[in-house]
Amino acid sequence: MQSFGQEWYIYDGNAYTIASTSYSGTGTLQMFTMHPTKPVELAGRPQYHMNQLTAFAMAANLDSCRDGVRAYKNGQDLVKEYRDAAIARANETANAKYEEAPVTTPADPYRVSFTSGSPVSTQN
C-alpha cells in the first residue's frame, strides 16, 4: 500500500505491522513486528522479517494482564494510524493521476454516460 503509484517498492526498514500470539496453556501474550526488505536478486521477491517486540505473562497477576491488554490495544491503534495514513497517501496519488487523465469528449464512443442525448417523448 505504501508503494501505490510509485515506480518502485518502498523499503524503509520500518515496521508497520504488529502481530500477536496468545498461548492459553501458559497464559502468555507475545507481540511481534514485521517488515519487508529488498529482494536479494533483482527480479526476486522481498524478504519479510519478524522480530519479537514484547511478551506478557497474562495469567501471572492483574498488573501484568492489564499491561498486556494495554500493549495489545495500543498496538492496534498504532497500526490503524499507519494504515489510515497509507490509504490517504494512496488516495492522493490515485486522485492526482485521475486529475491528470485526459478528459473524454461526447464524441468518444467509450464514454460512459447515465443520460441520453435523445429527446424524451411521452404518451398518454
Image (spheres, grey):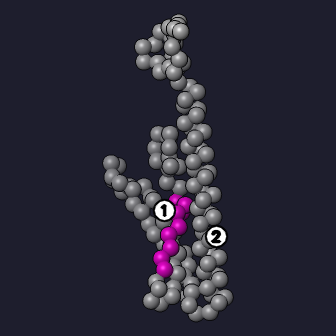
In the rendered image, the residue lying farthest to the bottom is 60
Tell me which residue sits at (50%, 46%) in the image: 3
Crowd class of label 1 (few under 14; some 14 to 19; many from 20; radius 10 Å):
some
Tell me which residue sits at (60%, 57%) in the image: 82
Amino acid carrying label 2: it is: Asn
Which residues fall within the magenta stretch? 13-22
Closest to the camera, between mark 1 and mark 2, is 2
Tell me which residue sits at (51%, 14%) in the image: 116
- Please determine whether, in this image, residue 10 is positioned above or below residue 64: above
* Rendered location of residue 49, percent (x, y): 44, 66
* Rendered location of residue 72, percent (x, y): 59, 73
In the rendered image, the residue lying farthest to the front is 124
Which numbered circle lies on residue 74?
2
Is residue 15 one of those drawn in magenta?
yes
Q: Is residue 103 visible?
A: yes
Determine the main secondary structure of the stretch shown in magenta.
Answer: strand
* Rendered location of residue 17, percent (x, y): 52, 63
SS under mark 1: strand
